[in-house]
Every structure is written in structure tokens, then in C-alpha cells.
Amino acid sequence: MHSISSIKRSLAFFFLILCCSAQAWAQETASNDVVIQTMKSELAREQAALAQQPATPYYMSYNIGDEQNVSIVSSYGAIAKSDSTHRRTLLVDLRVGDYSLDNTHQIRASNDMFARSGARSIPFEDNAESLKLALWRATNESYNTATERLQQVRTNKTVKVTEEDTSGDFSNADAANHYYEPDIAMAGYFPNKKEWEARLNKYSALFAGQKDIFEGKAMLEANIVRKYFVSTEGGEIASNQLYVRLMVIATAKADDGMELPLYKSYFAYTPSDLPPDDTILRDVRDMIATLEKLRDAPIVDPFTGPAILSGGAAGVFFHEIFGHRDEGHRQKNEDEGQTFKKKIGQQILPSFIDVYFDPNQKKYGNTDLLGYYKYDDEGVKGQRVDAVQNGVLKSFLMSRSPIEGFSHSNGHGRAEPGKL
């Protein structure tokens, strides 16, 4: 008869074998990925070549965003649009100077829009030669832009007064992370396009015959966003973000000509996780009934006073007035509002409110969360940030752009593909 301890040892050994096998499989799969291997080889070649230049980059990274999308729109029970797209964009982050001052530094009192070169569309086929050419061209252009701009930055600092925030332009980070998820094809992720066209027609058909509704649509988007990242620090990451969004939109017109729009949206990681037909059809009928009531409702005169927001509206409102304003880089940019720049340690919300941001949280109850990810776009592992505790502001969402009092990233350097 086996003892409990021997069983535990056997289970631990079994799980160790599984983990090692999974890691070996991921490494082997990554080695067969044309995109990430081409990015690595070209980055190494460019790094060696630019090391011979007078102004040597102290950091370089490539970000490629691969986006597959299926979009279906049904209006009044008939398909108005049903298509798919596939595109790739490339961002090069090339920095000359050093961590304390580089080409991304803000040039004050100027219409300075491009601290780094913008995104470029590149071939979405896995062809190594075409990818190499695209990477070479982008790196060459980025280097020329960076060296020219660094001179402008240094001149600007000479003629301007000392900045209030004297922290550096880039922070050191543990960004030599290796993480790989296999590529996913849209055909496998979203195989039932015709079935969904029929379902959307069923939803939007309920708006047909409603004489006061002049817009009645059901829309669905299926998305696979794959992000590739490599850097001269040794980071190698390929990760996927999969989600579907379904929206029902209706607009009525009151007798005085006022337009009255309503919409309902649903989000899930997979198509099968979206609500069933009976739930969506019930929501559509509720929208129709609400629009009828809105048409007959009296117009409210403008007033200054308290307002009660619904759950969804309150979430969007809080996201805009707090979420973006808690981003660290905004506290440093003099063109931003810098709402909370000097509020650390101060009461900004009622004492019964805590606010945290956790990219590791994939669900809240049974609800899928769009903000889930493992690594940000700078190769840093996403971390939970307790921004507000008992109503007191404690921290910011930090990328690798340091600010006074917060010198390191907490893994929140994220953007849409093709954006900085």
C-alpha cells in the first residue's frame, strides 16, 4: 500500500514531466515560426550593422501586430456586409542616446507628433524574404529619424528651462522573457460564418415593420490579434488575443425630429460563449419597447445636479475620467492634463472604494474580460496594480517610460497594434 508522501512525490514528478514537455514543445514550435525567427535574425543583423555607426542604438525592438477579422452586419433581417480582413503592422522602437535622455524625449513648445517612427503595413504572408526587406527598410528609416531627432531634443533642452520631472526616458526592466503561443487560423476559430449570418438576420428582423425605427442592425466581429515582440535585451514573445463582439443597434426618431439611439453589446473569448438566441432576442424586444417610451418621454431641461448612471454607462465614464488619467506616461507629458500627477497619497475617492488593474484576471465571475494579457508590448510581464486603496491614490499604470517616484514598469505598456 502506497503512503501519502510517495503518492505526492509521484504526482509532483508527473507534473514536472508535463511542464518540461510543454516548455520543450513551445520552444520547438517557436523555432518553426517564420515570423519570430525572421524578426530575431534581422534584429541581430541590424544591431551588428548599426554598432558601426557613430550614434549606436542602445535599445531596439520589433513589434508586429497580426490582425485577422471577420465582420458581419445584418440590417432589418438581411445581410448588409459579410467580409474578412487580414493585415500586419510593424512598429520599430529604436533608441539612440541613453536611458536618461534619448530620441523619444518630448520636444517642448512645438507641434511634436512623432517621437518615434510610425507603424507600417507589411506583408501578412509568412515569407521570410519579404519580411526581412520590410524590417530592414523600417529599421533604416527609424535610425535616420532617431538620430536627427536626438539632436533636436538636445537643442530643445539647452534653450528651455529645466523640466519639472527630471526622470529618464526609458527604464531598465526584466524584459528578456520568452513566451510562445501557437498561431491560430480564423477558419478554425470562427468556422460557422453562415450560421452566424442567419442568427444576426433573426435578431435584426425584429426591427422590420417598426415605423419609428429608421436604423435596426445586428453586427458581429470575430478577431484574432497576434502580437510578436523581439528586443535587443533578449525578449521573444508571441501571444494571441481572441475575442468576439456582438452589437445590436437601433435608432428611432421622435415627432420633433430628435434621434434616439440605443445599443446593446456582448463580448466573449469564443463565439460559443456568446449568449443564446433567446437572451439576445429578449434584449432586442426590450430595446424596441424602450425606444417607444423614449419617443413619448418629455424633454428634460438642462440642469446642474447629481445624476445616476446605469452600470454600463458608469463603467465607461469611470474608465475615461480615471483609467486613462492613471497612466504613468501622461503625468510626464506636458501636453496632457496630468490630473493625478501630484495626488499620490491623497484622497481622490470615497474611503470605501478600492481600484485595481489586473491583466492576469481573465474573468470576473462568469464575465470574460477584454483586458487580459500575460506580457505587455515592451516585453514586461503584466502585474496587478493597486491604484487606489481606501480612496487614496497609491500608484500609476507604468510602461517603461519612468516618472518621478516611479522608476520601473509594472507591465502596463500596452496599445492597439500599430500604435505606440
Image (cartoon, rainbow, N blue to C red):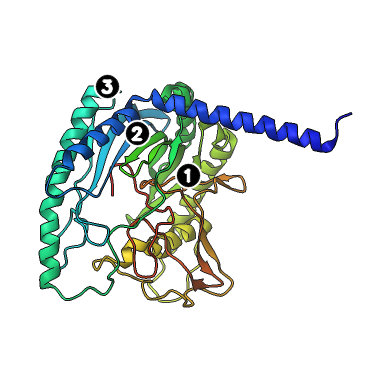
Residue under numbered circle 2:
67
CA distance separating discs 2 and 3:
17 Å
Q: Nearer the viewer, residue 74 or 48?
A: 48
Q: Residue at label 3?
A: 127
Mark 2 vs mark 1: give the one in front.
1
**Residue 388: x and y, percent?**
51, 68
- Spatial CA distance of label 2 from label 1 is 18 Å
Q: Earlier in the sequence, mark 2 or mark 3?
A: 2
Whether residue 84 sits left or right of residue 135 in the image: it is right
Q: Tag 3: residue type?
A: Asn
Residue 387 placement, left or right of 8: left
> Does residue 198 appear anywhere in the picture?
no
Q: Can residue 345 be seen at all in this image of the molecule?
A: yes
Q: Residue at 56% of width from left, 37% of height from top?
A: 275
Residue type of the residue flagged with mark 2: Glu
Quarter occupied by the N terminus: top right
Q: Which residue is mark 1?
A: 374
Question: Which residue is the extreme one toward the right?
Answer: 1
Using the image as rendered, state which of residue 279 and residue 367 is in the foreground. Answer: 367
Please name the residue shown 17% across and 44% down the image. 142
User: Which image quadrant for residue 362?
Assistant: top right
Residue in the image at 45% along x and 41% along y:
248
Element carrying mark 3:
loop
Viewer-nearest of discs 2 and 3: 3
Q: Earlier in the sequence, mark 2 or mark 1?
A: 2
- Image x and y of residue 264, in percent: 47, 46
Bin the neighbour count of mark 1 within 10 Å (Cα to Cα): few under 14, some 14-19, many 20 and up.
some
Residue 145 vertical position relative to residue 168 in the rendered view, above or below = above
